[in-house]
Image (cartoon, rainbow, N blue to C red):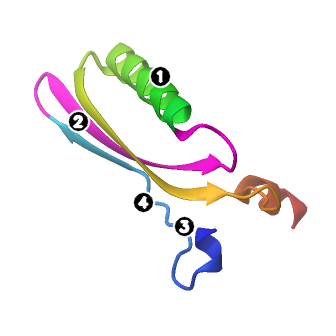
């Protein structure tokens, strides 16, 4: 839906922000969910997966993961990846 609003297109810097300390990190994530899915279920799954991956890869303790749902992908919209393959 965001692409339908003037100035609402995607940016390559949008989506992830990390504050990293000596032994801890805080992550801010911006995600897009598919229409009809449970936002609570999606955010719980993303949070668990991100904490696990970041702690495993960096040995930092993830003390906070903030997730914002910035858009809902409607069934008739194609992914950016699908669009680039069609061109």
Which of the two labelled residues, at mark 2 and mark 3, occupies the earlier sequence position? 3
Which numbered circle lies on residue 49? Answer: 1
Image coordinates for residue 51, horizontal then vertical, percent: 37, 22
In this view, 85 is above or below 16: below
Image coordinates for residue 25, horizontal then vertical, percent: 21, 31
- The quarter of the picture where the C terminus appears is bottom right
Residue at the (61%, 56%) spot, across then down: 72
Image coordinates for residue 7, horizontal then vertical, percent: 51, 82
**Quick one: label 1, few (<14), some, or many (20+) residues within 10 Å?**
few
Q: Nearer the viewer, mark 2 or mark 4?
A: 2
The residue pinned by badge 2 equals 26
Which of the two labelled residues, at mark 2 and mark 1, occupies the earlier sequence position? 2
Which of the two labelled residues, at mark 1 and mark 4, occupies the earlier sequence position? 4
Q: Furthest-left residue in view?
A: 22
Q: Please tell me which residue lies in front, 24 or 69.
A: 69
Callout 3 secondary element: loop
Q: Nearer the viewer, mark 1 or mark 4?
A: 1
The residue pinned by badge 3 equals 10
Q: Please tell me which residue lies in front, 87 or 24.
A: 24
Image coordinates for residue 77, horizontal then vertical, percent: 78, 62
The residue pinned by badge 4 equals 13
Asked whether, in this view, residue 8 is left or right of residue 1, the answer is left
Residue at the (58%, 70%) spot, across then down: 2
Mark 1 touches mark 4? (CB < 8 Å) = no
Distance from disc 1 to disc 3, alpha carbons, whole Å, reads 24 Å
Asked whether, in this view, residue 61 is left or right of residue 36, the answer is left
Which of the two labelled residues, at mark 1 and mark 3, occupies the earlier sequence position? 3
Mark 2 touches mark 4? (CB < 8 Å) = no
What is the magenta range?
A: 21-39
**Quick one: label 3, few (<14), some, or many (20+) residues within 10 Å?**
few
- The quarter of the picture where the N terminus appears is bottom right
Distance from disc 2 to disc 4, alpha carbons, whole Å, reads 17 Å
């Amino acid at each position: 839906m965001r692409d339908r609003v003037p100035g609402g297109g995607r940016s390559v810097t949008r989506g992830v922000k990390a504050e990293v300390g000596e032994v801890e990190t805080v992550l801010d994530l911006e995600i897009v969910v598919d229409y009809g899915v449970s936002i609570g279920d999606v955010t719980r799954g993303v949070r668990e997966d991100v904490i696990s991956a970041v702690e495993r890869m960096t040995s930092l303790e993830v003390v906070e993961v903030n997730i914002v749902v910035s858009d809902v992908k409607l069934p008739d919209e194609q992914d950016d990846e699908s669009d680039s393959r069609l061109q």
